[in-house]
Amino acid sequence: MKNVTPETPVKYEITYEDDESISIWRYNTNKSTSGPVEVEYRWKRSFNPWDKKKKTMGEMVKEMKKKK
């Protein structure tokens, strides 16, 4: 009698998409069974993380004093 088991794919990828980015999670069960082997992020053209100005320590201290 032959043992029949359904074949699971060895290599596959899952794609997640939201408003700002697309992330591709690649799996390879020959290398790892507990998680992805590679994760790739692609930012959409409309998303610009460098548009926001970072605050300096002095600006953060001034804000904390205003809140008190």
Image (tube, rainbow, N blue to C red):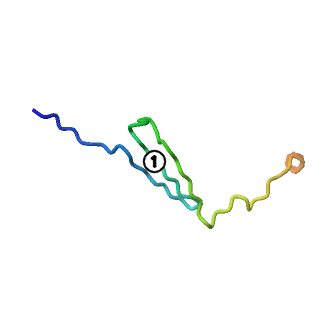
Position in image of residue 45 (x %, y %): 61, 66
The residue located at (41%, 35%) in the rendering is 33
The residue located at (39%, 48%) in the rendering is 12
Left or right: where does residue 49 sit relative to residue 23? right
Position in image of residue 42 (x %, y %): 56, 58
Q: Is mark 1 on a helix, strand or loop?
A: strand
The amino acid beneath tag 1 is Arg
The residue located at (75%, 59%) in the rendering is 52
Left or right: where does residue 49 sit relative to residue 20? right
Q: Is residue 67 above or below residue 46?
A: above
Kindly identify which residue carries mark 1.
26
Q: Is residue 44 above or below residue 57?
A: below
- Quarter of image, res 68: top right
Position in image of residue 36 (x %, y %): 47, 42
Q: How many labels does the image show?
A: 1
Residue sitting farthest toward the top: 1
The foreground one among 17 and 31 is 31
Position in image of residue 46 (x %, y %): 63, 67
The residue located at (48%, 55%) in the rendering is 16
